[in-house]
Amino acid sequence: MNVVGVLSCLSLLLAAAASQAPKPCVAPALMSGGLTVMTVGAISSTGTVSYDAIGQRMRVKTMGLAANHTAILDTLMLFNKKVYYEINWSKFTCKKKKLDTDFIPMQVPSDAKLMGQVFMGSSSSWGMGVLTNTWYGYLPGNGMYSSVFTEIGCVPLTFSSYTPESNWITVSTFNWVLGNSNPMDFFPPFICAKAQLEETETPANMFTVLKSLALRDKMEE
């Protein structure tokens, strides 16, 4: 084989390898699962999440723990209406607040950079592990993030972000299933019928809402 033939084969191999590299992806549009939110100071909350990218809606129900105090909070985010509801079932109260207009879908942004690809678990036998991709990128206002998605299905596993305003926050998800078994998850409960929109200087976004879920119990002490 001459030099030209060798170079041609090498070019084909390199092209094939490049075509197999992980690419940014978008998670399924309708999912339900569990999540854990961690912030600085070892403050955490855990619960369930219902996600609807088509209607731009999300429902998060959590139980938070800090300083031996527990609080249960139910939050409905309606990005299409620019509002979110904080429902406290223990106090039977509901607050309606402004939400940032931007809906952030569960996806790998097109400008994200690949940090690496690893098996969570083992690759020795089928069913012993899952192939994942870790991505990273930057957020407005000197922020940064990293996220882990499965290679097959683009299912989100973890998301960590830092901004000077919100500091560090890590969201871990698990037990995802496609679809949603309860359509009423995306409608305000009856105790919110008379809730008036609270005026705030800066509308919340998904990052600040998730952080407030973890901090809520501490603020209520």
Image (cartoon, helix red, strand yellow):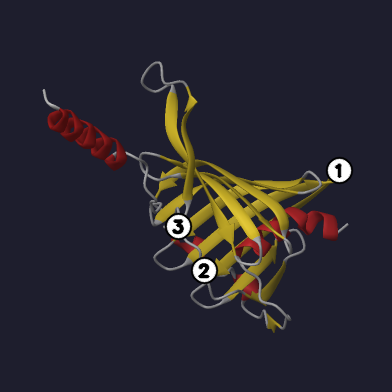
Residue type indicated by callout 1? Asn
Mark 1: which secondary structure?
Answer: loop
- Looking at the rendered structure, the kind of residue marked 2 is Phe
Viewer-closest of 61 and 15:
15
Q: Is residue 180 visible?
A: no
Rendered view: 188 above or below 151: below
Farthest front residue in view? 3
Using residue 96 as the reference point, say whether residue 217 is left or right of it.
right
Lateral position of residue 64 relative to residue 150, left or right: right
The residue at the point 59 percent across, 68 percent down is 189
Image depth: mark 1 or mark 2 in front: 1
Label 3: state its secondary structure. Answer: loop
Residue in the image at 41% along x and 57% along y? 110
Q: Which mark is residue 111?
A: 3
In front here: 92 or 72? Answer: 72
Residue 141 picture location, percent across and down: 65, 67
* Tag shown at residue 187: 2
Residue 197 image position (x, y, % from top left): 67, 82
Residue matched to label 1: 68
Side of 152 where 56 appears, left or right: right
SS at badge 2: loop
- x and y, in percent, of residue 219 in the image: 84, 60
Number of the front mark, 3 or 2? 3
- Residue 89's disc number: none
Position of the N terminus, as image quadrant, is top left
Q: How many residues crowd around disc 3 within 10 Å: few (fewer than 14), some, or many (20 or more)?
A: few
Report x, y in % for residue 134: 50, 41
Question: Which residue lies at the image location 80% right of the left edge and 55% below the top edge?
Answer: 217
Tag 2 or tag 3, which sits nearer the N-term? 3
User: Which mark's residue is nearer the viewer, 3 or 1?
Assistant: 3
